[in-house]
Amino acid sequence: MKRFYAFGIATVTLLLVVVSAVFAATTMPPQDGAAQEGALPTATYLPVGDDFTYTVEQVSMADAPILFDDQEVDGFSFTDFSYVTRYPAGLDFTATITPPEDVEIVSINLIYRFPAGTQGRVQAEPTANENEWNAVAFDTRGLPPWMTMDVFWRVAYGETGVAESDPVTVQYIDPTREWWRVESEDVIVYWFDFPQEMGEVLVTAFYNVRERYIRTFGDVLPFKPTVVIFPPGDAMGEWRPGGQINPRTTGMASSDTYSATLRVRGLEIEEIRQDCIWNEERDLEWQMRYTASVATHEVAHLYQYAFFGGRGPTWWIEGQATFLELEMGPVDQRLRYLAELGEDMPTLQGSGPSGMVGTPAIDGCTHLGYEIGASFINWLVNTQGGYETLGEIVQILSTGIGIDEAIEMATGVPFLELERQWRTYIGVAAEPYIRPTEPFRFPPTVTPFGQ
């Protein structure tokens, strides 16, 4: 393992960023000055501080067995307990499990438990060696590298007897390549094929958004999230079942492993985004900055899981995560431009808008549902009491109340009226079209084939 320790220092100031000032695309669509007047600033609070520290290291590990101390539990002896990481095809556990005299083992399982408490098991099989047992977890893939878990052996014996070894903590190491690792107060980040600066950009981003997370959710996460970053291309798919990944996938979060996994966007604009009029020129700096925004978005989902169970319509869940990104982007400008083109924004009522990752709108750009949600939340923060109101909505959601009622309770204004005001601000018809609920009809009788 190569280790390089460095302490980063960054001076950060309190900024209130106007959306239009952030946008730097060279392909900006024609603007009607009057239509863009009165755009609200993004309510972006960055913490004030003189410096912060983090450690950086390069991690290069062989796939040699890692051995744990011997244990004696309820008369059972657990010796030579070890594991080998077979990334991306699993973790291989072995132990010699010797029962007390005259005790017959019925079965043995390896139990793995993720940080959130969710767990799984793998049926162990005896090897050719006396009292030696083997179990391979995630041999069909499905787990990203660098995840941690507690594992222990569960032995069933006799009629109803059960003995368990004490848990040990293991990490799913990737021995196939050299990774970078950076850790700060806020996050642990792994990446490869990009320079050391990638990690520094990431930890600085999380330092910058920490106060926004706190103001929204009331506190920091009760754990330190892990962010694993893959380069452009297919490498991110290697740990997925079947060894493949949806080519449109950029990031995902797991409330089980307390982690986010994402892929850097390439320098070439993806086919689905080639006609987007808001595309920016891409270079290494753009890649790192965009990755930081995706990472803060995905970790916002971990906050949602932790503080209100992640419940709500997609526009709220994805819109709030977009609102909390390092750079939310020109969402209001985009919606106003679509309004000028005659696009009528779908209502937030019920399940809300569609138009998510893989659906381009008439401006050639995707993620419209995300940006509608982010625009509404930004408008809400700017006009209805700031982050205090947003935090109150989150607290109400944590009690199991739905988003419409939670917003009304926090603001004192009917949700439909708030939507009307926001739609007026965006420049579309104030009254949203709400699809009527169709009466239930029993399905027609199905005649089996051949009759």
Image (cartoon, helix red, strand yellow):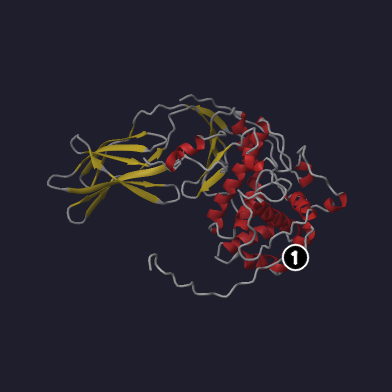
- Residue 153 x, y percent position in the rendering: 29, 45
Image quadrant in which the N terminus is located: top left
What is the crowding at mark 1: few (fewer than 14 residues within 10 Å), some, or many (at least 20)? Answer: some
Residue in front for this viewpoint, 109 or 335: 335
Task: Give me the residue at 64% from left, 34% from top.
Answer: 288
Residue 119 visible in image: yes
* SS at badge 1: helix
- Horizontal side of 444 relative to 336 (left or right) equals left
Task: Give the amino acid type for the residue marked by disc 1 in the picture.
Answer: Arg
Residue 76 placement (x, y as % from top left) = 21, 44
Q: Is residue 145 visible?
A: no
Residue 196's quadrant in the figure? top right
Q: Quadrant of residue 166?
A: top left
Closer to us: 164 or 434: 434
Q: Residue furthest front?
A: 450
Where residue 91 appears, as percent x and y from the top left, is: 36, 38
Q: How many marks?
A: 1
| Image quadrant where residue 304 sits | bottom right
Task: Farthest residue to the right: give it.
Answer: 34
Q: Which residue is mark 1?
A: 420
Q: Where's residue 200, x and y in %?
A: 62, 32
